[in-house]
Structures are given as C-alpha cells and as structure tokens.
Image: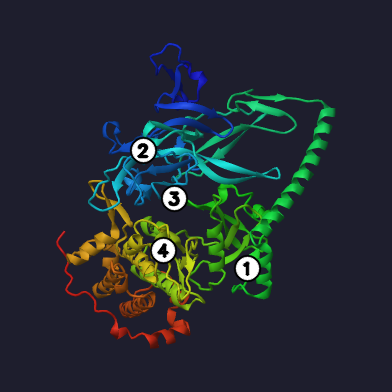
Amino acid sequence: MKSSECYAGKWFEIECRNTSTYTYYSPTPYLKWIGLEVKSIDLQLGTVNINNPIYRSNCGSKDSRPVNQSLKGSPFVYSQEHNIFVAAGCNSIAILKLNGSEVSGCVSICDENYKVGDIGKMKLRNRDCNGKSCCDSSLPLYLTEYSTVIKGLKENKKSTECSYAMVVQQYRNYYRSDSYYDPRSYYIAVDGVVKDLDVVPAVLEWEIVNNLNLTLPADHFSYCYDTNITSSRYKRSGQRCYCRTGYFFNYGNPYVEGGCTGVSISFGSIILLLILWRVLKATKQTIVEKYRKRMFKRNGGLLLQQRLSSGEVNVDKVKLFSLKELEKVTDNFNTNRVVGKGGQATVYKGMLINGIIIAVKKFKVQGKIEEFINEFVILSQINHRNVVKLLGSCLETKIPLLVYEFIPNGNLFEYLHQQSEDFPMTWDIRLRIATEVAGALFYLHSAATHPIYHKDIKSTNILLDEKYRAKVADFGTSRMISSDVTHLTTVVQGTFGYLDPEYFQTSQFTEKSDVYSFGVVLVELLTGKKPITLTSSEEAKSLASYFIMCVEQDCVFDIIDEKVMKEGEKNHIMEIVNLANRCLELNGKRRPTMKEVTLELESIRKLTGKSNVQEGHNELVRSEDYQSWDDYSTILEIRSAFDLKSRTPSLKDIHICPI
C-alpha cells in the first residue's frame, strides 16, 4: 500500500513482501514498521493476529537469539486477554523480562521417566501446562516489548536440555449444554511439535492513540469511545470505533466516513423479527434458568443451604448469591471492573445494594472446582481479622464463584516494591505487617478447629486494607489437616522463590513449609528486594539463598533496605534477621513454629514501640488502629506455654562489611 490515505499513520501501514522463491505463492502481508507477519485483522475487536518468533535454548544448530520484541512507540500492545507466556523444558526457569526486570515467568520440571528429546516431541495444543515438562504464566498489561531468558532450576547450573519459550495466542474451549455455551478451558493455538516451530500465532491489541491527532468520523452507523490500551499513565490513551447494531445489519470499517454499511429492512419484517426475538429471548431465559438450577444442584447448593441453616458452617454471614445478582454488581463482569488477574482466576470489583463493596473471584478453567470447594470450606471456618473474609459464593455457573470482602490497597508486593511518597514503607509498618501475617498463620496452624496449611504464602497473597492492615488471602491450594494424617502430594504446588526446598524434594508439606515461605516474606520486608532476581550474568538468584549467604559471611547489613537501617535500631533489626534466618533453615525441624515466630515479633514490636515513645516519634497510623495480639485472651494461654527466654539463641557478632 503506497498511499498514506490507506492507513492511519505509519504504524498501521501494511507491506506485502515476497517471502518465497516460488512464483505461485502470494505475497505475505507485514506490519512494515514492526516487521511482524499479519495473519488477520479484526476492526470490531481492535486486534491483529500475527506470527510471533519463539526462543530456543540449548537446541544445537537450531538455537535462536533471545527474542527481543519491541512495539515501543506504536499503537500496539501484546494482548493480555488473548495471549499467554508458555515455556517447554526440563527443570528450567523461563523468565519474561521488560526493560531488564522480570515481569512474568514459570518453572517446568520433569519426572523420572523423562527421556532426552521428549520436550521436542511435545504438542502444546490442548495441553495443560501446569509445570510438568511445560508451564505457563499470564502477561502483564501494557506490554509493548519483552525479552526471554531460560535458566537451569538449580543455582549456578545451566539447563542442558533443549528448551523453548514463547508468547502465544490462547483460545477458549466452549462447552454446550442445552444450547447454553460456557467457557470450559483454554487451549494454545499451536499445531505440531515444538521442535518444528519457528513462529507461533499471537494477538496484538491496538487503538487510535491520541498523539496521531486524527479526527474520527461522526458517522450515524459508527460509534467511537475512549480507551486505555497502550499506556498505564493515562486513563484515555486513545480511541476505538465499531459499527452500531440495531434495526439494521451493520458491517464494514468504522474508522472511515461511510465505512459502516446499514442494510434496511421492511416494517413488516421488523415486526416479525421483534416477535421472533421475544420468543427466542423467553426460550433462552427458560433454558438459562434450568441450566443455573442444574449447576446449583451439581455444585452441592442444596447441601450447602442445609448446612447454612443448621449453623454447621462456622461463619457469621455466608450468603449464596445468584448469578444475576453478581452480574448486576460487576456490570456483567466488565473488564473495567477487574482488580486482579492471575493464572487461575480473575477478580472483579462490585458493590451490593446495601453499599458493601465486594470482590468476586471467577476461576478461569474447568478443573479448578476442587480448589473452589477447598477454599470455600476452609474460609467458612476462619474468623480472624488478618485473614480475608469470605462473604459467600455463587453455585449457578459451571465453575462456581467466590465472593469476598473487598481489600482496597492492593497487595504487599506492590506496596513494597512500588513504594509511593504518600505512604512510605516505614520500619514500624513493616514490623507490624510481619506480626499480623505471623499471627494469622499461627491461628491457622494452631487455633483453628482443624490445622490449616496455606501452602502459598507470598507477598502477592498478603492484601492491605484501608488502614494498611495485612489480610492473608488466596486459599485455593490450602488443606485442612487431621492430626493423624501426613500430608503427601503428587504434584508440588507453590510459587518459586517462596517454595520450601524440603517440600520440593520430599513432596511432604508440613506447617514448617509455611514457616519457610513466611521467612522469605520477612526477608522481603527487611531488604525491599524481590524473591527472585537476575544477576548481571542473567542468572536467576533466590533472595532466600542470597540472604543466608550474607548472614554466613557477616555482611547482612549490606542488603538491608536503607529506610530500615535509618529508622530501626540495629539490635532490633538483628533480632528480625536472626528470626528470618531460622525460618529459612533447610531442615524443617530446626525452624521455629508460627507460635514462636508470632511471640518473638510481638516482643520486638513492644521494644521498638518503647524506643519510639522515648524518642518522641509518631507512627504513621494511630496505635489504637492496630491492637497487638495481647488484646486476645488466647495470648495468655500462649505465653504460659512458651517462655520467651528459652528461645533459640540469636546469631551474634554480625559485622557490616565495607561496600
């Protein structure tokens, strides 16, 4: 296309290239200024399907350079909704980086039956990449450029097996039941085995960005609206248009004047269509109601109602919401209501009629029904101020929904690693958050009706409420443990960087595994560093192992956050260092219990509080907003069972090494 009238700015220019030596092959369309092959364009959705290169590592003559894709400066981004980051390999870590910082990644391991070459023969289509030989992870929003890195799982050891990493399109499978379509699972849009792949399909989203200074057509059949696709800095970074629907059949290009074609129909036809539409609507509503009632029964709704009425479920107010009610409060699960998105579920914000703000957790794929039931049963038996409160559930969908209290201030990871000047992460706040999380875990391990192991403690699963109090969340992988049961798992679950090495080796999860994960969070609070970092040689480095090394080499103060060093007293900081070091013991039996951890943190907080009073400092938040564990009657019983003077001796003579 030579004429500039054919496209809205240079970024939208399509160039046809002869990519084959055979004359009977048609030229291939490319986005000229980006250099990516175009497969299709959807004007209504604002998407472009492209062929995206993949990255190979340790594949001999087929090795490829690290993929460094860039859409920077263009009106395009890699779609978070339609793409996924996938890696295939054996005992390797695949990392997606943006400007040198990791933004996504996953870990894949192999079992004992693995043979060299099995990875290359793998077909990704319709495969559940849950960490065995392949893994996947979601993309961040506003992704305009990325690079990929594949490293060995063990430190200082490179992966020797041929491995693959890619940003690839994902499709939804839909399940039909009584003419009602329901999303059932996802499949990766890749045909063939991975060793034969050079490119994979991916999806770009686009908008008419504001800096193009274009006047979009004021057409009767087209409608343009503000969008925020390409920039997190602006609420309205551009616009999109689509052809209206109504009593006309509209199609065409909404971005040019007269581009949307309306085909009118006769008045009699309109009346007939209206009658048919009302009949179809009534029929569909009947079918949907029957489907929802069937799903309600299948998901145990009748039994749950009995338990709620009998008081068997130990929670003040757990409600069974209707799907219609949740659709109304979330604007039909509008993407504008999304407040959190992970690999397994999406969380939407809504407001009930009584003004209570809620968070609705919607699982993405079929097969997570077990996690839903598990999370509901566990949370219905928990009543603790530092654990996110379950308000109810909806059982009228293929995959049930959970409804929680809405926690407004995000998670600890964001607060810690993206600090703002308005709410600085002070030493007192860090210490308080650590104490609150420890107290919640101690409650789960000891004070609940049955011991509960969280199994995925990490800073992103620690939410912060309106007063920045900690709330432990995401119990999807948790388990209630009987006193006579040893918890063995066939698949290791958890998050790399927080995962207990002993659990990884034995597949036996104990309360001390939660202690290890909490130790990593404690080190995050001390250092302000992420659980996994890349060294200058692009080697994946565990914060836990780095912290232990610094303790052993008497250089631990070199990595403590500057704000902590400035605000905290050295002896108090060292007590926390010693406590974190004990939590990260490789031998789980040597780690303290969460009861011991809680009491130690309470003791340190009291000492810190006395020091602050003597020095005349004022805390950011009033002390009455954060009552200590001493306010609970159970603390008296705990203190009588545990003598603080008998705790494990702390490390001594730690020196600051010159930087």
How busy is the neighbourhood of tag 3: few (under 14 within 10 Å), some, or many (20 plus)?
Answer: some
Kind of residue sitting beneath label 3: Asn
Image side of residue 616 versus residue 323, left or right: left
The foreground one among 54 and 139 is 54
Ranked by sequence position, the earlier of labels 2 and 1 is 2
**Which of pointers 3 and 1 lies earlier in the amino acid sequence?**
3
**For the residue marked with disc 2, what is the amino acid?**
Gly
Residue 622 visible in rendering: no
Q: Going by the picture, which residue comes out furthest to the left?
A: 658
Q: Secondary structure at mark 3?
A: loop
Q: 584 and 335: which one is in front?
A: 584
Task: Name above or below for residue 166 compared with residue 615.
Answer: above
Q: Residue at label 4?
A: 457
User: Left or right: 368 with respect to 248?
Assistant: left
For the question of whether residue 495 can be seen, the reply is yes
What residue would you read off at disc 1? 318
Of pointers 4 and 2, the one earlier in the residue sequence:
2
Q: Which mark is residue 90?
A: none
Task: Rate crowding at label 1 as few (under 14), some (14 to 19) or many (20 or more) other CA atoms within 10 Å.
Answer: some
**Residue 516 place in picture, x, y as percent:** 34, 66
Left or right for 393, reference 387:
right
